[in-house]
Every structure is written in structure tokens, then in C-alpha cells.
Image (cartoon, grey):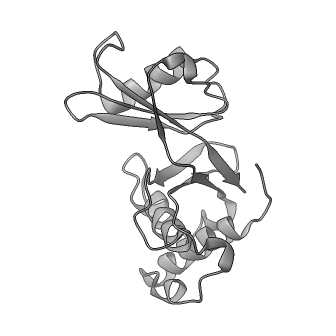
């Protein structure tokens, strides 16, 4: 599902802006929690540049905070300032970033990779050594299950070629713009 200028992305933007100015999100965290964000849920906050290039993406697979509102605030700030693949967001970039919030449905363990579909399901792959990688659903250019798994294994530094003894989960998301 896609929603333009949703409350989800407005909260994420406000948290990033407040952090840029005050190095804190205390003010926004102390506001009244909107009803539609008062339930517990995991989420990812993705930042892209105006030319659709990834600029940050951090999230949780299970809820960490007392409500989705706080989960969005914390993940937005982490995505903007703590994604170690990128330098921290600058105030000059603030008004040109594109924010997406994906709220996760609980992951379900699957026994066979035929139950995956990268357009519909995100996936989590883990090995017996505790390495784990995740990929959100619907990422442009990832069209096959094999490609999805290959990217997740690479991200998680899982070097084994086969999928034997790996654990797979799938999940859906609700996407807000």
C-alpha cells in the first residue's frame, strides 16, 4: 500500500529535522502519540536522494519501542545519521530527501524458498553462526528469489553456496510515502 505524505513520513521527517537542529528528539518524543501510530510494530525507514539513490535505511524486525510512533522516530534518526554505509545527513540535504516508512507484519518461518516472492515478501536469512541478513520486499531490480537470497547472503557475509542449514523467514510490509 502506498500513501503520499503520510503521518508516518511526516513523523520521520520531523524527527530528522529536530535531530539536525538540537542533536535530540526529546521534543517530538514528548508529543502526544497519534492514535494511528499508537500500536507496537517494527518498521524500516528508508531515505533516498532526489535521484532515487539510497541514502540510508535502518529498521527493526520486531518492535523495540512502546509504539510505532517511537519506532519511526528512532529508526528515522538512525537511518539519517547512523547508517554506517553513508556519512550523516546534512541540513543541506534535508529538503531533498525522499522518505519511505515500511511497517512490518510479523515475520514467518518458511521451510521452502518457493514460498518467497521478492515483489511481495521481504526475507530474512540466517546461518548457524548467528549471521543474519534482511531485504525488504519490492526493491526495484530484484526480480527472482535466487537474486534476493544472494543479496541477503552477501549482506550478512554468509559465504556458503547452498541454502542447506540456513533459516528463512518471509514478511510483508505496508509502505508509506
Q: Can residue 89 be spotted in the picture?
A: no
**Residue at the image point whose x is 48% and y is 38% from the top:** 108
Q: Nearer the viewer, residue 6 or 167?
A: 167
Task: Please identify the residue farthest to the right as the structure is shown.
Answer: 4
In the displayed structure, does residue 65 sit left or right of residue 28? left
Residue 52, x across and y down, in percent: 67, 43
Residue 161, x across and y down, in percent: 33, 10
In the rendered view, would you say 31 is above or below 84? below
Q: Nearer the viewer, residue 172 or 87?
A: 172
Residue 11 picture quarter: bottom right
Residue 24, x across and y down, in percent: 42, 81
**Residue at the image point whose x is 68% and y is 51% from the top:** 175
Quadrant of image for the C terminus: bottom right
Q: Nearer the viewer, residue 16 or 51?
A: 16
Residue 163, x across and y down, in percent: 36, 14
In the rendered view, would you say 152 is above or below 61? above
**Residue at the image point whose x is 47% and y is 18% from the top:** 112
Amino acid at each position: 500500500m502506498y500513501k503520499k505524505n503520510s503521518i508516518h513520513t511526516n513523523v520521520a521527517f520531523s524527527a530528522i529535522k529536530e535531530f539536525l537542529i538540537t542533536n535530540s528528539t526529546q521534543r517530538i518524543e514528548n508529543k502526544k502519540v497519534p492514535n494511528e501510530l499508537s500500536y507496537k510494530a517494527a518498521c524500516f525507514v528508508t531515505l533516498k536522494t532526489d535521484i532515487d539513490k539510497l541514502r540510508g535505511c535502518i529498521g527493526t524486525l520486531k518492535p523495540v519501542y512502546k509504539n510505532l510512533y517511537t519506532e519511526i522516530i528512532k529508526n528515522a534518526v538512525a537511518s539519517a545519521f547512523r547508517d554506517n554505509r553513508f556519512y550523516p545527513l546534512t541540513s543541506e540535504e534535508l529538503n531533498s530527501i525522499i522518505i519511505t516508512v515500511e511497517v512490518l507484519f510479523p515475520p514467518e518461518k518458511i521451510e521452502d524458498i518457493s514460498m518467497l516472492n521478492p515483489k511481495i515478501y521481504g526475507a530474512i536469512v540466517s546461518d548457524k553462526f548467528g549471521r543474519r541478513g534482511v531485504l525488504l520486499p519490492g526493491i526495484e531490480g530484484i526480480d527472482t528469489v535466487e537474486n534476493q537470497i544472494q543479496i541477503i547472503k552477501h549482506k550478512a557475509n554468509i559465504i556458503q553456496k547452498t541454502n542447506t542449514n540456513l533459516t528463512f523467514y518471509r514478511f510483508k510490509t505496508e509502505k508509506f510515502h
